[in-house]
Image: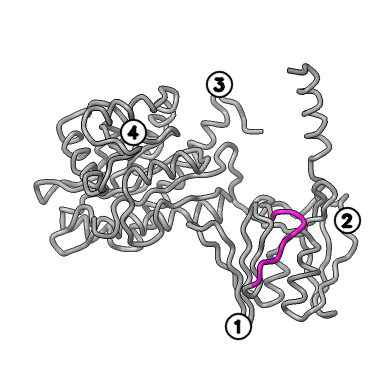
Amino acid sequence: VNRRVPALLFLLLVIASPVFGSATATIDGKSTVRVAAYDRDGVIYVELGPVVAALGFNSSWNESSQKLLLRTDEHVLVVTPRSRYAIVDGRLRRMVGAPVFLGSRLCVPMAFVTGPLAEHVHKPIVFSEPDLATPPPPPALPHTPLYLKKIVLDSGHGGHDPGAKSPEGHKEKDINLAVAARLARRLTHEMGIEVVMTRSDDRFITLSERARIANTSDADLFLSIHANGAYNDVATGTETYFLSFDASDIQAARLAKAENDSFTMAEEGPFGVGGGDDLKQILWDMVRTETLKESEKLASAVQSKLEMELHMPSRGVKQAPFYVLMGSSIPAILVEVGFMTTSKEAAKLASPPVQEKIADALFSALLHYDTFMATQAGGAMRP
Ligand SMILES: [Zn+2]
């Protein structure tokens, strides 16, 4: 290996660092909007949001497909971060560079806006010479993540697997998804964190598929959201789990068994292996001790925020052998946000304001964990 490589890499990084600035877009010779602009390896990128808003597009971010969908009555535009291909009115259009996020602002090559986009909307779009010496307006995000870039949110159960049910018929799978969706929105819009949902609608996903998503999405952590079930109708409170080969108590063991039942609903085991002890051993071997430490830290952050922000008893941080956590090679926790089997509690969990409160608590726990990971002794900051 050439010893000069690190120095060369450093030089390349310096050269490749974007120069930020701003530009003004004039649309159809009339309206003018100011956008962030920057030079990335000689390609001028501009912020897409203000331009498409001025053109009357409504935008929505699809979490599961990681695409930005923009619509007017006549036009549909689909933009995928990190893909050079956009779909404009059903036609594939190639850009000179892939769209990228600058904080929460999605930026695309200027040539795409003045070319294919302008053509499709039949309105000329003209940019001023970008002023690259002026820094762009500060990011609109209230929180800038220090460490976290991408998170996998896992809504437990789904499809033919309802999870725990309340006497009144509320289903755990719906509560899990509602909380995950609320949390995803906050993470995306307030922190600019990329969120991957293992499911974004009511469908069955095997536990091995959930673990596969955790391990292949290049995410920083895996958060599985569940609501609890008990054999009595008075159990109450929240609890947060990280992985252990052995359950910390008898209730934890029972719960892991119940949650792992989704596993037996799958036709085959994860990684094409049958169930039982061999599988457990294979999964356990995949777990690295350092992610366990991070998982424990994350679990205590989550449990303490739930304790502070919800008017519900705290059942603490526990450990149990959940398959969905075992398969994950990134820090992973499972949170039980309350009991479905207790009528009063299930009714609370089904109410949107309570779901928002739970999402709030999880959001602040992730903020706390983000700061911890960025500042802990020996913890390296992300490049
Ligand atoms: Zn569950």
Per the rendered image, the range of residues in magenta is 91-98
Q: Are marks 3 and 4 in contact (CB under 8 Å)?
A: no
* Label 2 environment density (alpha carbons within 10 Å; few <14, some 14–19, many ≥20): some
Q: Nearer the viewer, mark 2 or mark 3?
A: 2
Residue at the limit of the structure toward the right, as seen here: 129
Q: Position of residue 216 (x, y in %)?
A: 48, 41
The numbered dot on residue 306 is none
Q: Nearer the viewer, residue 366 or 153?
A: 153
Disc assigned to residue 131:
2
Q: CA distance from mark 1 to mark 4?
A: 47 Å
Q: Which mark is residue 377?
A: 3
Which dot, 3 or 1, sits closer to the camera? Answer: 1
First in sequence: mark 3 vs mark 1: 1
Residue named by callout 4: 326
Asked whether, in this view, residue 379 is left or right of residue 4, the answer is left
- What x and y, as percent, mark residue 165? 18, 57
The local crowd at label 1, few if under 14, some if 14 to 19, many if 20 or more residues have their Cα within 10 Å, is: few
Local secondary structure at mark 3: loop
Q: Earlier in the sequence, mark 3 or mark 4?
A: 4
Q: Amino acid at mark 4?
A: Met
